[in-house]
Amino acid sequence: MISAQAWADAQRLWGFQQMGHELRPCSVAIALGSHDLGVADTTADLYHQGVVPLIVFTGATSLTTRDRMPRGEAEHYRERAIKLGVPADVILVEPRARNTGENIRFSRALLEEHGIAVSSVLLVSKPYEERRAYATARKLWPEVEWVSASTPMSLADYVDSIGDAHLVIDMLAGAQQRLMIYPQQGFMVEQLVPEDVAVAFERLRAAGFTSRLVAGIAERK
């Protein structure tokens, strides 16, 4: 059972991760591979809306996806998008990335290999990782403009889609922790974290939502 306080704290982290960017036409979409096929669905929808002319699906497999997506996250995303009516010839697949930094670096290299000029990128991620993905992308490819997007849905709806509230809050806490400590490691640009968000994170950690936290790295003071 999730306490009312833990749920309220999770809602605060969920809201903070949402960048609230206004969608606009971009040179390309980069969709970050994961367990969540909703990322592919949203990317396909945005393509059909005319927001982007080209899509890069990026991602290998992980412990949580190797059974569900044996051909790799990016390939399963590609297959899903094609089923949703996206032409195969507007999709590039980057099959090696195993973390967000590699998603960005390898996708950039792939686009350069194809001679594709990029001035702006629509970055599509899971709803609870919008800000983390954006901060990473800004660090690794600062020359382009980034527009962050995810499937528009509430935390309650996302929990229903996953079927495990504790796991979702664990993932939220993990995303928030990385947002707070990774700038020190040079992995992403600094994001100003409001005090109430930091306090909400600390309460969730104290309450045991820790399975997705990074161990052995000093916290930001």
Image (tube, rainbow, N blue to C red):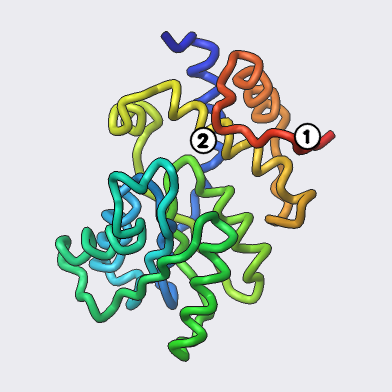
Image disc number at residue 15: 2
Q: Quadrant of residue 68?
A: top left
Residue for point 54% across, 54% down: 99
Please, is residue 207 above or below residue 220 in the view?
Answer: above
Whether label 2 touches label 1, CB < 8 Å: no
Q: Secondary structure at mark 1?
A: loop
Say whether residue 146 is left or right of residue 2.
right
Residue for point 42% across, 74% down: 28
Seen from this angle, which residue lies furthest right? 221
Please, is residue 98 above or below residue 113 in the view?
Answer: above
Image disc number at residue 143: none
Say whether residue 141 is left or right of residue 91.
right
Say whether residue 30 is left or right of residue 48.
right
Q: How many marks?
A: 2
Name the residue tied to disc 1. 219
Residue for point 25% across, 81% down: 89
Where's residue 194, x and y in %? 70, 34
Q: Which is more toward the observer, 64 or 125?
A: 64
Q: Quadrant for the C terminus, please.
A: top right
Q: Quadrant of residue 146?
A: bottom right
Residue type of the residue flagged with mark 1: Glu
Please, is residue 138 above or below residue 133 in the view?
Answer: below
Residue 23 appears anywhere in the view: no
Within 10 Å of the Cα at label 1, are there few (<14), some (14-19), or many (20+) other Cα atoms? few
- CA gap between label 2 and label 1 equals 22 Å
